[in-house]
Image (cartoon, rainbow, N blue to C red):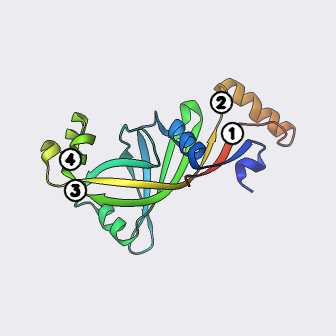
Amino acid sequence: MSEANDNHSDYHELSGQPGLEKIGELVKDIRMAMMSSVAPNGSISSRPMATQNEPFNGTLWFLTRGSSEKVDELQHDSHVTLNYADPGNSKYIALKGKATISHDRARIKELWNPIYKAWFPKGEDDPDIAVLRVDITEGDYWEASSSKLVMGFKYLAAAVTGGKVSVGEAGHVTTK
């Protein structure tokens, strides 16, 4: 049983199209994710990644340096976790998936945004740009739909009543 479920959140198990839609809804306005991957020595590495503004269909897209350490890690082990947080709206999402790297110039041009010049000063034709594709397999989320003030009262009520008040919606999503 999940911690969120123990705290009397409304808990949902979603799969297939409803699961894809829920993930898409949760991450659509959160531009940055913390991507964690496994280093060759078994330790976990995490770094911020800017999610591309693409409709979610089970895949999330990123641009990265082809020469980066993360690319080496992903060639060793393609499993990643993407953590998204929007504290202002009380949304937290952890997604698991498999990453692949390509140097598809057409896809780089499709995903290019001038803001990426900060990381790639040579522009979209920089030979070190790579496309990082993450195919999501599952995820967990928690969101509170109430205002911060209401949530504060719910937390207090849950504490006083031994957790008998719902403090949000939580769930597990599988994409297949």
Q: Is residue 121 visible?
A: no
Q: Position of residue 32 (x, y in %)?
A: 41, 41
Which labelled disc corresponds to residue 145? 2
Residue highlighted by disc 3: 103
Label 2 CA crowd tier, 10 Å (few <14, some 14–19, many 20+): some
Compare residues 11 and 50 and report the one nearer the observer: 11
Name the residue located 55 percent from the left edge and 52 percent from the top edge. 175
| 160 with respect to 30 (left or right) | right
Q: Secondary structure at mark 1?
A: strand
| 168 with respect to 57 (left or right) | right
Compare residues 80 and 53 and report the one nearer the observer: 53
Q: Position of residue 31 (x, y in %)?
A: 41, 38
Residue highlighted by disc 1: 169
In 3D space, how far apart are the residues under numbered discs 3 and 2 (Cα atoms)? 40 Å
Label 1 CA crowd tier, 10 Å (few <14, some 14–19, many 20+): some
The residue mark sitting in front, 2 or 4, is 4
The residue mark sitting in front, 3 or 4, is 4
In 3D space, how far apart are the residues under numbered discs 1 and 3 (Cα atoms)? 39 Å
Quarter assignment of residue 101: bottom left
Label 4 CA crowd tier, 10 Å (few <14, some 14–19, many 20+): few
Quadrant location, the C terminus: bottom right
Quarter assignment of residue 146: top right
The three-letter amino acid code for the residue at tag 1 is Glu
Q: Secondary structure at mark 3?
A: loop
| 67 with respect to 138 (left or right) | left
Residue highlighted by disc 4: 106
The three-letter amino acid code for the residue at tag 4 is Ala
Query: Sequence order check: which comes first, mark 1 or mark 3?
Result: 3
User: Looking at the image, do the residues carrying marks 3 and 2 touch, with CB atoms under 8 Å apart?
Assistant: no
In 3D space, how far apart are the residues under numbered discs 1 and 4 (Cα atoms)? 40 Å
* Residue farthest bottom in this picture: 41
